[in-house]
Image: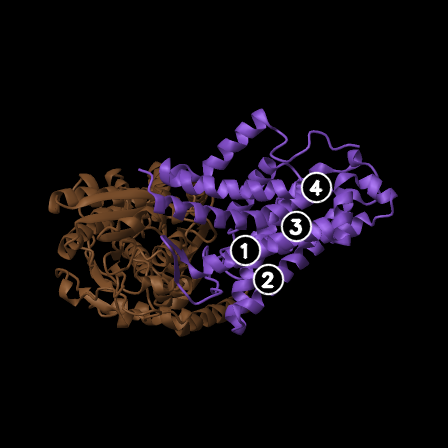
Amino acid sequence: MLRQSSRYWRLAGLAALLAGLLGPAGAALAAEPIKIGVTIAMSPPGSVSQGTQVRDGTDVAVKMINDAGGVLGRPIELVYEDTQGLPEKARAAVEKLITSDHVVALTGEHQSSNVLAEIEVAHRYHIPYINVNGWADAIREKGYVEVFNPNNYNTRVAVAMAAAMKALGAKRVIAFCENTDYGVGLAKGLGEQLKAAAPEIDYKYETLDRAGKDFLPALLPLRANPPDAVVEIMLPPAAYIVLNQLYEQGIAPSAKTWLYDASGIADYPDFWQNVGDGAKDMIVFGLYHPKMAMPELGKKVAAAYTAKTKNEPSRLLFQAADGFFVLAEAIKAAGSTDPDAMIKALEGIKWTGTRGEISFSSEKSGYRYHQWIDIPYVTFQITGVKQPMADTNLVQEAGKPLDVGKLQKPAM
Amino acid sequence: MLSLSLSLDLLVNGLIIGLFYALMAIGLSLIFGILRIVNFAHGEFYMVGAYAYTLIALAFGLSPWLTLPLAFAAGAAVGFVVERLLMRPLYAGYTSWGLMKDEYAVIVTFGLSLLLINLVDKVVGPYGYRGPSLVQVSRIALGPIMISGHRLIAAAVALLVIVAVALFIRYSFWGRQIRAVAQNRLGASLAGIDTAKASAIVFALAGGLAALAGALLSPIFNPTPDVGVFPAIKSYVIVVLGGMGSIPGSILASLMLGVLESFGAVYISYDYRDTFGLAILILFLLFRPQGLFGEREREV
């Protein structure tokens, strides 16, 4: 008896010593993990380019949290599911994550059509959902209490684009959008904003298949009568092909026609291996630029990401990291993983993330519901082939108007 | 409103796309002619060529003109191996078409397609790559027509290869043997023709042609693992339109489909571009099921 008791105390002493040596991180590792579901496109036809950046951004953020001891003394475990960019697969993935993996919250999704499919399931099971990159206003208009949007939204881009088209003095504008909720929603949104801000501009949009390859027949009619600006509202890989084909046909960018990228794809790691001369002189709506002022957390995430991947940071990296960080903050504030407590904590959150102070609007109408309204954005122009982001021409700083005088018009 | 310069643009671009479709469809047609199976992995031969061309050129800094035959060789090698390893059970030990296991070919080629797509996705990665252009001239103006330098040169290469293949099938020793096997496998076998070798040559040629199409188009349609899916679907339509197993039919149907899609996208709707071929296919199946140059009866 005595010997048993003595062994017990020796083991307990050893455990205490180990716990002391490992500190809070060790304690967190020993505790039951908190599972978070992450849905991304890891294979075609989804945008794998986006999915990979979201995965890297989420991984970086989770490592930072786990290294610091986790949340509520528990480590975070991510459970990834590949949606292939297909709403039906996305819906099934979320169903599995909730019912089989028992995740307490969801994040990661980066395509609007998928977000729209996934939030139906999250809403049914009352699980908090962070929309990382679904821009479609329709996501917010659903009014689901579980869904929070610390990312960009179509109305914000449409307002920015309409102001840019007006500032450029364009008389005729044509948009090419992909056939998704995001693409068509943004193209329509631009039309509405132009009607309000610059009714003199003649605007139309054409829908292109996001799985398509040859867009020439849709572009050729512009050659004889080029517009003043072409707006591209597509995601890779189709977006890259459209940019190349617009350039090969001499349509845009040209001395007559501005090319405006509304999707913010110029900072994607595979951008320059897919787009050549066609990107030179392109004007880009950007959610990140190396010259933007960033909070300390943003700088740390950027450094960790570059150390891990050797790539330049991109906007999706920060969006993905913030998507996870706000969840972690909500769990901390709630003191538990109870959905109602987490939702309440998210509704009251005021927290400085990687891009600025994040808070969610409580206005229950339209696109503003549970939206971080004042997302910072910039506009920049690419002035050389294979140009690093830091060398691009920043023509609109966050919160300031577009400075048209800084733009460089293509020579031919 | 029909503008002359736009119509010329559409015609030329439709014909060029048609030439690339033809490179794909000829191989598919040859395979059907000799083995009477539909190769569901044909799009992946195209993908192999697109990746081989792009990755070899980028990794080793080779001239695209040197890389082009390597892409053809890669596709031909894959085609040859597929025939040797996976297609032989279709006819080995059998002398009658009736005994061939058609469902086996469907399952095997479909499985092969999925395997190759996922293999490339995992090994090479999901990111797209743009292949190097054959010429460094971005645009060439031919009167009112503007065309990318690479597209024009690639179309010329495709045309030359199509002519060479047609001459090979028509006049060469092995071309005649392939035609004999396509007409009557048992009869050709009785006449002393090595039908297994003919099948292997056809698969290698089909793989090489599809890979060449992929290589030529890689600077235009940046390769991704699923890049071969759409061209393969077009090829199935073309083979039926042209007449199953008919090479001239496949070439004509390819050019027709390219031009139809080009004009239809502008004058009807771009949204329905991929459905034009299917609509024509339904009409053919209703009123001329044997296609443009197909035969109503093949048995002798």
- Report which quarter residue B209 is drawn in: bottom right
Residues flagged by tags 3 and 2 on a common chain: yes
Q: CA distance from mark 4 to mark 2?
A: 25 Å
Q: Position of residue B69 (x, y in %)?
A: 61, 64
Q: Which residue is mark 3?
A: B166
Label 1 neighbour load within 10 Å: few <14, some 14-19, many 20+:
many
Q: Which residue is mark 1?
A: B214
Q: Colour of chain B?
A: purple
Q: CA distance from mark 3 to mark 4?
A: 15 Å
The local secondary structure at tag 1 comes to helix
Residue A273 marker: none
Residue type at tag 1: Gly
Q: Does residue A166 appear in this view? A: yes
Q: Which residue is mark 2?
A: B71
Q: Which residue is mark 4?
A: B33
Render colour scheme: by chain
Q: Position of residue A226 (x, y in %)?
A: 26, 51
Q: Can you tell which of label 4 and label 1 is closer to the viewer?
A: 4
Residue A269 in the image: above or below residue A36: below
The local secondary structure at tag 3 comes to helix
Residue A22 in the image: above or below residue A219: below
Q: Earlier in the sequence, mark 3 or mark 2?
A: 2
Q: Badge 3 sits on which subunit?
A: B
**Quarter that holds the N terminus of chain A:** bottom right
In the image, the chain rendered in brown is A
